Every structure is written in structure tokens, then in C-alpha cells.
Image: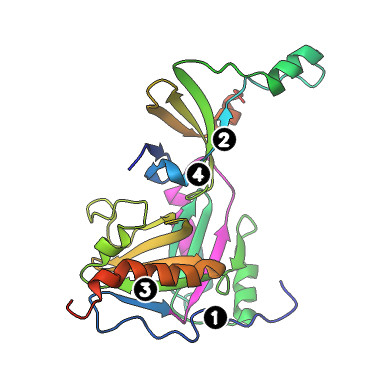
Amino acid sequence: MRDFPLNNVSPFATMPDGQAHGAIHIAPVRTGFVFHVLGQATGTIDQTRQQQLQKMMDAIAPDLGGELRVLSPGQWFWVGENDVSQGRFGEIAGQLPGEFALSDQTHGRVRLRVTGARVCDVLAKGVMIDLDEGIFGVGQSAMTQIGHIGAMVTRLDRDSFEITVLRSFADSLWHELHHMAAEFNGPHS
Amino acid sequence: MSSLVKCPHCGLRPREEFTIRGEVPTPRPAAGADESVWFDHVYLRDNPRGQHREYWHHSGGCRRWLVLDRNTVTHETGDVVDASTLKSEGRA
């Protein structure tokens, strides 16, 4: 546990919530938490292990909710909408079995929501995965890149995506996404 | 899109997400092996024409080391496995 409190300041503090008038809406997610869960590194992504972890999370912190997003074998992001105090985080981390380690990344990985009818056209300019609904369905997550910036892309709905990016790249990505969306957010769109 | 690589964890991804380390060398010699055997293992590479096995790091995705079968003539990629499977088989 760290011995000083972390002050979560949004990297988007001075920015408006996207361009609400356009066809694409880009907005920061200001509440919630991102926990990095590290398990034993194995050569495969183990679904049963993930289900076990999900059960443990539900038992330890039923108030938190949230979901697990696979990062790599034995690694997940536990992401939810409720704010979590550092005291509560310590309690949760202490209750997880020893094979898992928990790291609060709420300050380090920030989230953005990109929504709108043409969102796939916008993201297709940068993301390296196929966004077809049959391949990347609702609820799925993928660790990938948007241009040169590493980010996790999660499909929340058909036309709604959440992007989790390292805090230091968030500002660049924010501007990049606005450039990518510009053609759909013009005065005539 | 250029070459697509089928990461065993992430699925089909473009080459740009990966960092290439190079040939998978022969199994590591015993600690007390002859100096020439070690020299061969550490410094000498075969540079074959045709099928070839390489270490690739999926730096833009799962960040796992992978072992990839690549044809140096056609650049076609074949089998891609997690590098830890080689370790368990005693091949690296």
C-alpha cells in the first residue's frame, strides 16, 4: 500500500464534453475505477480462471460491480462506474487470494467514451482491430493501438465504445479522436 | 493493411503491433559446455531461406512473447504460439 493519498485529477479538466451537436460524441469518463488484476502468467487465456476471479470479486466487493476486461493471459482490468476510496481499495486488495495482485490504476488509465452513428468509421481510421459486430461484439474488449497510442477498446453498444488509455497519452488521443471525427462533426453533418 | 499476424491471445493483428527480436536459437547449451558451443549459440545465426522461427513480442497488445513461423521468401506466417510453450517443451 502506498503511504500517501493519490489525488485523481482528470486530464480533461478544462475540456468540454466533446461535440454534442455533431454525429460523434467524445466524452471523458470522470467517475469510476480501473484496477489492474495480475494473476499467475500462463501461456493461455484461461476462461475458468476468469470466472473464478469474477465470483471472488462479487463476494469480496458486491457494492463495486464492474466487469473484468482481459488484458493478456493472467491479467485483467477490473473496471466499474462507482468511485472507490483508497481505504476501500486496500480492504479489497487484502481480501483477494495471494495468487492475485491488485493495483489501483484509476489515476493512470483514463477512460473515454466515443458514441454516435458513425463511430466505427471514426475508429476504423486508427484502431488495428476489425470493428465488425460479428467479430468484435458488444461487451468485448481488446488491447490494441489507435495510431501509435496503445489503448484498450471496449464495445459498450453497437455505436458506443469505451477507450482506456494511459493518462500521459490521453490528451494526444483526445485531440487525435477529434481530428478523426472532424469530417462527421462539421456544420452540415 | 500489411501482414496480419494471428496472435494466439488477441487474434488477427497487423504487424505494426509487434516488435521482432529475431531467430529462435537452438536450445541453450549446458552451463559448462565448450566455449565454441556457447559462441555458436550466442553469436551465430543461420539466416535461412524459407521456413524460419522467430521471437515476436506483441508490444501493442497482450505484451506476450510469441514464437512465429515465417517464410523468409514469401513472408507468409504460419504457426504462432506463446513462447512459454517452448519453455515447457524444453526447446528454448
Q: Residue type at mark 2: give it.
A: Ser
Magenta stretch in the rendered image: A29-55
What is the distance, in whole Å, between disc 4 and disc 3 at their CAs? 26 Å
Q: How is the image coloured?
A: rainbow
CB under 8 Å between discs 3 and 2 = no
In the rendered image, the residue lying farthest to the front is A187
What is the distance, in whole Å, between disc 3 and disc 2 at their CAs? 36 Å
| Observer able to see residue A66 | no
Residue located at (37% from left, 68% from top): A177
Instruction: Tell me the number on the disc at residue B58.
Output: 4
The residue mark sitting in front, 3 or 1, is: 3
Position of residue A1 relative to residue A10, above or below, is: above
Depth check, front residue: A132 or A12: A12
Depth check, front residue: A17 or A89: A17
**Residue B19 in magenta stretch:** no
Q: Residue type at mark 1: give it.
A: Val
Task: Characterize the local packing of mark 1: few (<14), some (14-19) or many (20 or more) Cα atoms within 10 angstroms.
Answer: some
Q: Which residue is mark 2?
A: B84
Q: Position of residue B28 (x, y in %)?
A: 69, 22
What is the distance, in whole Å, between disc 2 and disc 1 at their CAs? 36 Å
Quarter occupied by residue A2 = bottom right
Q: Which chain does the numbered disc 2 sit on?
A: B
Same subunit, tags 4 and 2: yes
Q: Which chain does the numbered disc 1 sit on?
A: A
Position of residue A35 relative to residue B10, above or below, is: below
Q: Which residue is mark 3?
A: A113
What is the distance, in whole Å, between disc 3 and disc 1 at their CAs? 20 Å
The residue mark sitting in front, 4 or 2, is: 4
Same subunit, tags 1 and 4: no
Residue located at (39% from left, 43% from top): B14
